Image (cartoon, rainbow, N blue to C red):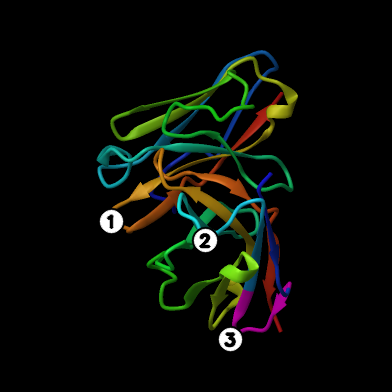
């Protein structure tokens, strides 16, 4: 059970917008630690999508955006494409666990 | 272009030591700016941070694994390694080496392809 809680799955039709939540607590996101998001395509290593809550590395489409408020963060994907079907993970730091933590992951299905 | 590549046995006997190496190309692990890390993923599950080594040689480990983990570096070979002792079936996972930036909230900007380690007799 991760200290960062994500929905196990989300889905959307091509072209639609979906959001994935990452709910933490006062010992991680709420303690002002940054949240980062990773995309893991089937059979591959994770790849950073969003860093520092809202920043996109070069090469990541602007269809992907991140936000953070209080003890939660969200990843939004607009204009869904079939290639977006993957697992998505949030990551932050937790002072109670004294380490870097990941959410349990969310599987995105493009209908 | 910076690349990371894991190597090591794919099968380890229970109670033995798991040993993996990450070869880094395109960047030096001896300079500052990054933490060189290990992360694992149990089959069909999420990601678990194991620990890191910094260019200075300092290390930090996941408290849940700390008693069994050692991360070391071979700077002349531009490699860093993971040792996990007294393994059990619960240590079966894909092990990734990754680079963690020192700024911007410490995210993992580069990952190796991962290597599956199975603990079984």
Do labels 1 and 2 touch, CB within 8 Å? no
Q: Give the residue displayed 27% in from the left and 47% down from the top.
A: A27
Which residue is under mark 1?
A96
Q: Which residues are magenta?
A: B10-19
Name the image quarter holding residue A108: top right
In the image, residue A43 sits, relative to residue B15, either above or below, namely above
- Reading the image, the residue beneath label 2 is B30
Q: Where is residue B89 shown, x and y percent of the image?
A: 61, 75
Q: For the image shown, how many numbered marks are present on the structure?
A: 3
Q: Residue at x 49, y 56 (%)?
A: B31
Q: Residues within 10 Å of mark 2 (few under 14, many from 20)?
A: some
Quarter of the picture containing the C terminus of chain A is: top right
Q: Which type of secondary structure does the marked residue at label 3 adopt?
A: loop
B13 inside magenta stretch: yes
**Which chain does tag 3 point to?**
B
Residue A60 horizontal side relative to residue B49, left or right: right
Could you say which is closer to the camera, residue B20 or residue A2? B20
Spatial CA distance of label 3 from label 2 is 33 Å
Does any portion of residue B92 appear in the rendered image? no
| Image mark for residue B15 | 3
User: How far across and down, in percent of the image, does residue A34 sit?
Assistant: 37, 38
Quarter of the picture containing the N terminus of chain A is bottom left
Q: Residue at x 67, y 84 (%)?
A: B13
């Amino acid at each position: 059970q991760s200290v960062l809680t994500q929905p196990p799955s989300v889905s959307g039709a091509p072209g639609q917008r979906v959001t994935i939540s990452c709910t933490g607590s006062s010992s991680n996101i709420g303690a002002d630690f940054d949240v980062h998001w990773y995309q893991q395509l089937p059979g591959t290593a994770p790849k950073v999508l969003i860093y520092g809550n809202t920043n996109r590395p070069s090469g990541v489409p602007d269809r992907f955006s991140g936000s953070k408020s209080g003890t939660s963060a969200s990843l939004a994907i607009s204009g869904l494409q079939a290639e977006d079907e993957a697992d998505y993970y949030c990551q932050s730091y937790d002072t109670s666990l004294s380490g870097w933590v990941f959410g349990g992951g969310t599987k995105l299905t493009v209908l | 272009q910076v690349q990371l590549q894991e190597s090591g046995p794919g099968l380890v006997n229970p109670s033995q030591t798991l040993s993996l190496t990450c070869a880094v190309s395109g960047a030096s692990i001896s300079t500052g700016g990054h933490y060189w890390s290990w992360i694992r993923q149990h089959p069909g599950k999420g990601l678990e941070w194991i620990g890191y080594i910094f260019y200075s040689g300092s290390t930090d480990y996941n408290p849940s694994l700390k008693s069994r983990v050692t991360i070391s570096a071979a700077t002349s070979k531009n490699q860093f390694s993971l040792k996990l002792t007294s393994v059990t079936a619960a240590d079966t996972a894909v092990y990734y080496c990754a680079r963690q930036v020192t700024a911007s909230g410490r995210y993992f900007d580069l990952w190796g392809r991962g290597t599956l380690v199975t603990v079984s007799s």
